[in-house]
Amino acid sequence: MVDGWEWDDSLFLGAAPYYRRGRLPYAPGLAELLAEALLLDGRGRLIDVGCGPGTLALELVCLFDEVVGVDPDRGMIAEAERQAARGPGHGRIRWVRARAEELPAGLGTFTVATFGQSFHWMDRDAVAAKVRDMLRPGGALVHISDLKTERLSVDGLPYPAVPYAGIEDLTRRYLGPVRRAGRGVLLHGTPGDEAAVLTRAGFTGPGRYVVSGGQALERTCDDIAAWVFSMSSSAPHLFGERLGEFTADLDRLLCEHSALGRFSERQPSTEIFIWHTPV
């Protein structure tokens, strides 16, 4: 767990309706890369741990007989159920409201486990050990995130860049200088070095893959506001009675940077680490 911080059920309270619109998608080609790297043939079972509103699980459902998405947030599970009902494969996917620390939760064994930018919120050593025991021999744990080291320019694109620095300053004016997270704060951010955790748990690897991004994206003011409210550090409940005031200030900030209310952005690349259990 994060030093000096404890998880609570308000971490993403109210964020679920904003998540799919606000968060940028994974780079195109993610499912195809995983199918090739893991020799997936439409059989087997996937567990997506910390599934949020189902972004990753829904993208990968075509690669498995069954997909199980697990998340502790009631709103996220409800949003995942709504999204699944609209798309193909909904008969092969189910959603379980539970913390990763509560696994195995009677869910059985799996071929693949995925963590899409969720592992850092968990008791990682405990969860890694639990997931290892839920995977079949030779099964894979897949850690997926945006590629953090790349710098993407909007030069040559039609609209201004998203004013992320200004949004951060505005959020700090309302919520304070230390990053909020549920009912607590993150004095030193979330932990890294997943490799050490997974090695301790007995996984071997990893194999590293990158799905290239860089595609031009157009974002509206509403998209950017949704991104703000999809974040744990600026979830709607954190603003309390000042939520309306913050929303108005955010709208003014965005209008100052783009009179047309349009912004340009580039699709981040997706970084993938694949770990295996012993055969």
Image: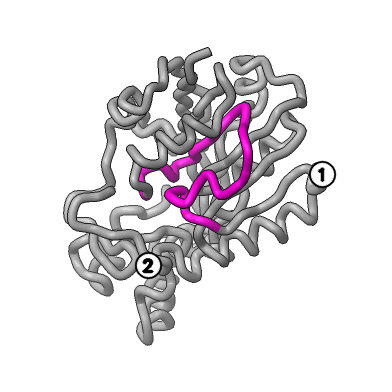
**x, y percent for residue 181:** 32, 62
Residue at the spot 25% in from the left edge and 62% down from the top edge? 169
Q: Is 79 positioned to the left or the right of 260 in the image? A: right
Label placed on residue 88: 1
Mark 2 and mark 1: Cα distance apart in space: 39 Å
**Does the rendering let one see residue 269?**
no
Label 2 vs label 1, nearer the camera: 1
**x, y percent for residue 187:** 17, 56
Q: Is 100 positioned to the left or the right of 194 in the image? A: right
Taking the view exactly as shown, the residue that stands out farthest to the front is: 106
**x, y percent for residue 101:** 43, 49
9 is higher (above) or lower (below) than 105: below
- Magenta stretch: residue 2 in it? no
**Type of residue at label 2?**
Leu
Residue at the spot 71% in from the left edge and 28% down from the top edge? 44
**Type of residue at label 1?**
Pro
Residue topped by disc 2: 253
Q: Nearer the viewer, residue 31 or 165?
A: 31
Q: Looking at the rendering, which quadrant does residue 43 occupy?
A: top right
Residue at the spot 56% in from the left edge and 66% down from the top edge? 74
Magenta residues? 98-121
Q: Nearer the viewer, residue 152 or 121?
A: 121
Q: Secondary structure at mark 1?
A: loop
257 is higher (above) or lower (below) than 88: below
Dot 2, crowdedness within 10 Å: few (<14), some or many (≥20)?
some
Dot 1, crowdedness within 10 Å: few (<14), some or many (≥20)?
few
Q: Secondary structure at mark 2?
A: helix
